Image (cartoon, rainbow, N blue to C red):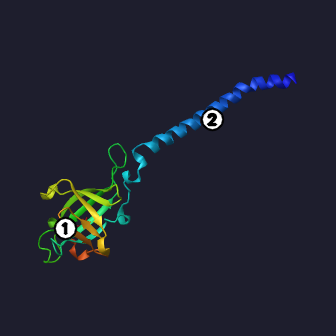
Amino acid sequence: MRTVTALISLLAPAAALVAGRRELIARAVAGSVAIVGSSRFSSPAAAVSARTGLSSPFTGEYDDPQHPGCLRSVKIVGGSLGPDGRRQKIKAEIKGVDDACSAGRPQLSQLWSVTGTPGKTEDGVDTLMIDFSSKGGPKNMLATFDNFGGVPGIVFPDGNKWVKVPGGTPDRRPPAVTLSTDEA
């Protein structure tokens, strides 16, 4: 019996050490969960849904009543790799043509391009913060995606609504330009 008691007394500190490590790991995990749960990430509305491509409601081509027949194209694309190797934020690439839209397909030189940042309001409404400064417009115009009356589109602060065109508007795009290695 003394041998068993002596053996237990020798093993007790090792068992306490193992239990101590387990407890330490359990507390660390519980602490990190508590920190994440209590931080700014606790609200689902605070996080932006990283929807790109066709999974974004904004991706598509639109009719703009202020420029009938002109190209309006929006693509939500994943961020490129930054200099530090990290993926940058997703962005909106918005392209269009404003002049001579009824004269056939536009030329590539007529195409304008602006960028934006997709987001969500606290109510879960999809938004785009668009920089129109390269066109002489505002740098931070907040547009929202609207599905009112079953008509999806992008609504701007002035009330203008670009209405999404199912299937796109390929006839409004400039002709595809490719580089040829055959030319001298």
State whether residue 132 is above or below residue 169.
above
Q: Say which amino acid is labelled 1.
A: Asn
The residue at the point 33 percent across, 59 percent down is 77
Question: Residue 145 appears in which quarter of the rendering?
Answer: bottom left
Per the rendering, the mark at residue 160 is: 1
Decide which of 37, 76 is in the foreground and name it. Answer: 37
> In the image, is 154 to the left or to the right of 112?
right
In primary-sequence order, the first of circles 2 and 1 is: 2
Question: Residue 184 appears in which quarter of the rendering?
Answer: bottom left
Question: Residue 112 appears in which quarter of the rendering?
Answer: bottom left
The reply to whether residue 54 is in sight is yes
Location of residue 132 in the rendering, given as x and y in whole percent from the top left corner: 17, 57
In the picture, the quarter occupied by the N terminus is top right
Decide which of 73, 159 is in the foreground and name it. Answer: 159
The residue at the point 21 percent across, 63 percent down is 156
> In the image, is 103 to the left or to the right of 84?
left
Q: Secondary structure at mark 1?
A: loop
Per the rendering, the mark at residue 4 is: none
Q: Say which amino acid is labelled 2.
A: Arg
Q: Secondary structure at mark 2?
A: helix
The residue at the point 66 percent across, 28 percent down is 17
The residue at the point 35 percent across, 58 percent down is 123
Say which residue label 2 marks: 22
Location of residue 174 in the rendering, given as x and y in whole percent from the top left corner: 20, 71
Crowdedness of circle 2 by 10 Å Cα count: few (<14), some, many (20+)? few
Q: Residue furthest front?
A: 123
